[in-house]
Image (cartoon, helix red, strand yellow):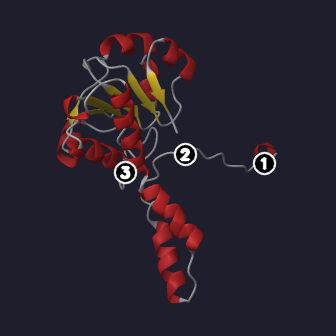
């Protein structure tokens, strides 16, 4: 019923970052505590959002294990480093939390971020930039943001490029049924 209203905003689970939503609740809660109110719901929301990078990283590790691939030997292709789709802004991005979590398991993480140049990706995130045309032998593909540029990815072609068929699709960008028919271990939020 809510979705029938003109001003309804539809939200989906994901990595919440950026310069507003990821930060502003802390200003509000700080002031609320000063005034004697403990904003439990806001703080709980921030705790959950702040932990999503590890949650997504754990999804990847579990999927690798299910595929029989040791995380320390895995190459992970991360799609999207900016805090939201189709913008070049990576302030307070949670994608880096996913990358660091996976690196903590010994995974080799590379990324394709079409909104940010390769040199910035290397300097800011310490990650190698690998485009769709250049990716090969990845053990897991993790889609963080559904940039328009990723629409060129054909799942059948992608299946041929990966060594281990793990697809963690945070945004439900790719059709689950098609991915599973192609043999991907498909995980989403």
Q: Position of residue 75 (x, y in %)?
A: 24, 28
**Number of marks drawn:** 3
Q: Is residue 175 visible?
A: no
Please name the residue that numbered disc 3 is placed on. Answer: 93
Q: Is residue 147 visible?
A: yes
C-alpha distance separating marks 3 and 1: 29 Å
Look at the picture and state if 24 lies above or below 35: above
- Packing grade of label 2 (10 A; few <14, some 14-19, many >=20) is few
Q: Position of residue 114 (x, y in %)?
A: 34, 32
- For image coordinates 52% across by 29% down, the residue present is 173
**Label of residue 180 in the image:** none
- Residue 189 lies left or right of residue 99; in this view the side is right
Residue 135 vertical placement versus 47 (above, below): above
Residue depicted at 34% across the width and 41% down the height:
81
Q: Disc 2 designates what residue?
A: 13
> What quarter of the picture does the N terminus occupy?
top right
What separation in Å lies between label 2 and label 3 (alpha carbons)?
A: 15 Å
Q: Which label's residue is closer to the chain start, 1 or 2?
A: 1
Residue located 37% across and 19% down the image: 165
Q: Which residue is mark 1?
A: 2
């Amino acid at each position: 019923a809510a979705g029938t209203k003109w001003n309804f905003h539809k939200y989906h689970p994901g990595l919440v970052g950026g310069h507003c939503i990821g930060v502003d609740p802390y200003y509000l809660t700080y002031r609320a505590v000063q005034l004697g109110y403990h904003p439990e719901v806001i703080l709980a929301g921030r705790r959950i959002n702040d932990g999503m990078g590890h949650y997504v990283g754990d999804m990847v590790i579990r999927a690798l294990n299910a595929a029989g691939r040791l995380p320390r030997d895995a190459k992970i292709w991360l799609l999207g480093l900016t805090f939201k789709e189709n913008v070049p802004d990576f302030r307070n991005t949670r994608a880096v939390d996913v990358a660091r979590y996976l690196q903590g398991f010994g995974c080799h993480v590379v990324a394709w971020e079409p909104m940010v140049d390769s040199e910035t990706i290397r300097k800011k995130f310490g990650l190698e930039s690998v485009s769709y045309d250049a990716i090969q032998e990845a053990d897991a593909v993790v889609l963080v943001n559904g940039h328009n540029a990723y629409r060129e990815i054909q799942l059948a072609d992608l299946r041929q490029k990966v060594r281990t068929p793990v697809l963690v699709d945070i945004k439900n960008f790719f059709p689950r049924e098609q991915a599973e028919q192609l043999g991907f271990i498909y995980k989403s939020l």
